[in-house]
Amino acid sequence: MRLSELKPGQTGVITKILGHGAFRKRVMEMGFVKDREVSVVLNAPLQDPVKYALMDYEVSLRRAEADLVEVQLLEEWVKARVHLDAHTEEHEEAELLDIRKDKIINVALIGNPNCGKTSLFNQVSGAREHVGNYAGVTVGAKEGFINYKGYLLKIVDLPGTYSLSAYSPEELYVMRYLREETPDVIVNVVVASNLERNLYLTTELIDMNRSMVIDLNMFDELKKSGSKLDYKLLGKMLGVPMVPTVAASGKGISDLLDTVIEVYEMRSSDTRHIHIQMNPEIEKAIRILIDCFKQDRSISHHFSPRFLAIKFLEKDPEVEEMLRPYPGYDKWCAIRDTQNNLIEKALHEDTVSAIAAEKYGFIQGALAETFDGGEAKEEKSTKIIDTFVTNKLFGFPLFLAIMWLMFWATFQLGSYPMEWIESLVSWISGTIGEYMSDGPLKDLILDGIIGGVGGVIVFLPNILILYTFISFMEDSGYMARVAFIMDKLMHKMGLHGKSFIPLVMGFGCNVPAIMSTRIIESKSSRLITILINPFMSCSARIPIYVLLVGCFFPHYGAWVFVGLYTLGIAVAIITARLMRKFWMKDDETPFVMELPPYRLPTFKATMRNMWSKAEQYLKKMGGLILVASIIIWALSYFPRYDEKDIPNTFRTETLKEMSPERISELGEAKVNDLILNEYQQSHSILGGIGRFVEPVVSPMEFGWKPCVSLIAGSAAKEVVVSTLGVLYVGEDDADLLSDRLQTPSKITGETPFTPQSALSYMVFVLLYFPCIATLAAIARETGSWKYSLFSIVYNTALAWIFAFITFKIAMLF
Ligand code: GDP
Ligand code: MG
């Protein structure tokens, strides 16, 4: 609530000071700062000013000013504080003692796309958010905390924007964030080597007149290029302190935080409010509009009148929306239109371009005095690399070659560390097998837990290698080029070049990929991109490929991988085309993705990325996969049967499948054992389900066990492998899953998979219904479960058809 709404006798606690500039300063100097108690002494209706008691003395405040102070009733505040304390408990307690509650600084990171906001955010808060060298990686706002010199800084990472207007979803998001959250200090991140464009946003923030620090990021690049920048002077000219940093390595960050605190405490000598003077014609229009807005003080609660006036002149829809409720709105519109006409007549261009030109003029002027551009080496090497990478002839083969290398490394290089983990797992189960006495508990641990989780965990190295490649491609800027060369192809699909990024992210995990489609402005493009995303083979499917390829195609690993991934992409393209043709008719927006200069990712960032992926994988193993393995084990273990329970028909049927030689070779006791085992598994709860659905996939010759594994894979695709691990119990406890899959059944003499059925199984896994997390993401992002249902039906049908075709073709060889 607002301070003005507080009734006599009530006590409130100040939570936020709205407004900006001189007003904010004055109110704060009067003692109205965050977390102070304030109570009303005298507040008669219609009386202005109102008397308040604050820190043992009385102050009077105009009602309009009291409107700009947000308070919370004391009781509520105490409750909320207990909540906050619980939240900050994660931070070291000793440090917490030093933090006074009025020393929480809300900091918002604002800057162009790809300027290093998320890198900075990660460095400061120790988070591991996704960083990539292309625009549009961050969607939504991320919060992080850091204790610094007795303050608790709450940092918010926002999506990148080029300006503050209601043009794109990101811009709108940032603008609304600034309006509603009123951060204490804005950190405007700018790229040091590309100041001209980056400072445009800065000029708009200056218009807003908020407490601000400019983070001159990528200072290393500026230095390397040989340019010189007098950033001290530039900061003075802009009235905003500037701090050089290298967010990727963490250099300069403590200086930046020091400056944030200085600005917050209003101690910074560089802070000063400037007006970016524009053409007199425009200035006159702005002045007239500001006078209009003065009628109602509540108009400028959130944004400065100057900012509102400029945006209103530019006909910004969001600002129009904000002003519409006021009674003078229609009159203001008329005034605005007259002024716009005057400006256009005087300057011979439309107001929006005129304002932009003035601002760029201001920036150029400021840079002319402070910036000395040397030879831009970085740009040169970027140009040379780009002639090859984006070349019509070489671009595509190069991309395929890199993909091949990536999969070769995933499979081949990954197989060594994989063997180490495998021998560890087999040693553990061998030892347990030796020392534990027989019984259900031993079966649970050996067949359920180690069989399931152990079967999947061995693929950790492969997944890390793949992720390293992907994150290198993202960080270096190569991915943006791939999007660029793919643009043509994407347009053929009726999609946008921007859609490519979520698709590539899908190789990691479909869930964040589907979330990142928010960068796509066109609704139908976005929907199509979401629906074809599951065809991008996510990393959870890799264990299945590595397992089966290792068993049946050890010499063609990379080729099978490239084949599968290409098939996934092809199916995605076909689907997109079909949807465009029959369902959602075209709407194309021009390709605006920029090509950032190439950057060598730092070792530290790469390691951090790897570690975070490893952590995620291990957590999944210890959580979801463990639980799923135990459930699957229990379903396949119960109900228990005895020799007596086996009907005679089953015995004779099974015996018929065995050749007489094998029966005599094994001996009667062993044969009876085998029959009991077979009956036990196939008549367990899971076996019942499996035998029920098996006919659906029998044309591809998947047995009931692989079939059940597919169903279990709906929890997460790794579960397909862990289920196979639980269901194919080895002869010896130390047997590896890959060996078990190649051992012929004692009864039928057949292996669980043939090369043909293995290949067709991989195709099925590639295409069939997405996991639950992905289905939920689809429903959330499209706003309807209908689309998730569509995915289940359509994808599974396609999977069946393609698996069948694959099987038939493979049988020819
Ligand atoms: P955002 O879009 O603003 O969130 O930017 P990101 O944090 O995702 O970073 C964009 C790219 O710039 C990544 O490839 C980073 O590794 C790289 N980067 C970030 N900060 C620096 C820096 O200070 N110097 C250099 N050379 N590269 C940086
Ligand atoms: Mg980001």
Image (cartoon, rainbow, N blue to C red):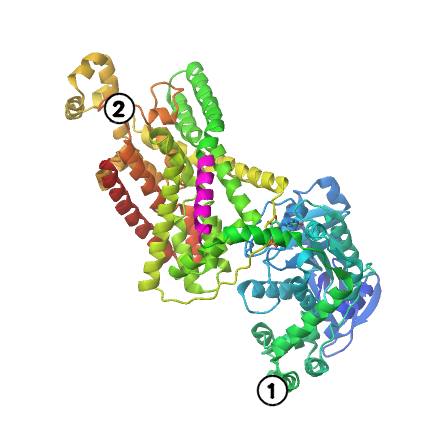
Q: Secondary structure at mark 2?
A: loop
Name the residue type under label 1: Ala
Left or right: where 199 falls relative to 630: right
Magenta-highlighted stretch: main secondary structure? Answer: helix
| Residue ID at (66%, 77%) | 309
Above or below, 333 relative to 614: below
| Residue ID at (61%, 50%) | 381
Would residue 290 be counted in the magenta stretch? no
Within 10 angstroms of label 2, few (less than 14), some, or many (20 or more) residues?
Answer: few
Name the residue type under label 2: Ser
Tell me where residue 178 sits by quadrant.
bottom right
Q: Quadrant of the N terminus?
A: bottom right
Tell me where residue 289 sits by quadrant.
bottom right
Q: Nearer the viewer, residue 189 or 450?
A: 189
Residue 68 is at least partly visible in this image: no
Mark 2 or mark 1: name the one nearer the start of the chain.
1
Tell me where residue 458 appears, x and y as whole percent. Answer: 46, 30
Q: Nearer the viewer, residue 796 or 505?
A: 505
Left or right: where 498 falls relative to 785: right
Tell me where residue 699 appears, x and y as whole percent. Answer: 21, 39
| Residue ID at (34%, 55%) | 575
Rounded to the nearest angstrom, the CA distance separating label 2 from label 1 is 86 Å
Q: In the image, which disc is placed on residue 745?
A: 2
| Residue ID at (68%, 66%) | 205
For the record, the magenta segment spans 393-410
Q: Quadrant of the C terminus?
A: top left
Q: Nearer the viewer, residue 522 or 771?
A: 522
Within 10 angstroms of label 1, few (less than 14), some, or many (20 or more) residues?
Answer: few
Tell me where residue 765 appears, x and y as whole percent. Answer: 34, 41
Q: Secondary structure at mark 1?
A: helix
Residue 299 is at least partly visible in this image: yes
- The residue that label 1 is drawn on is 334
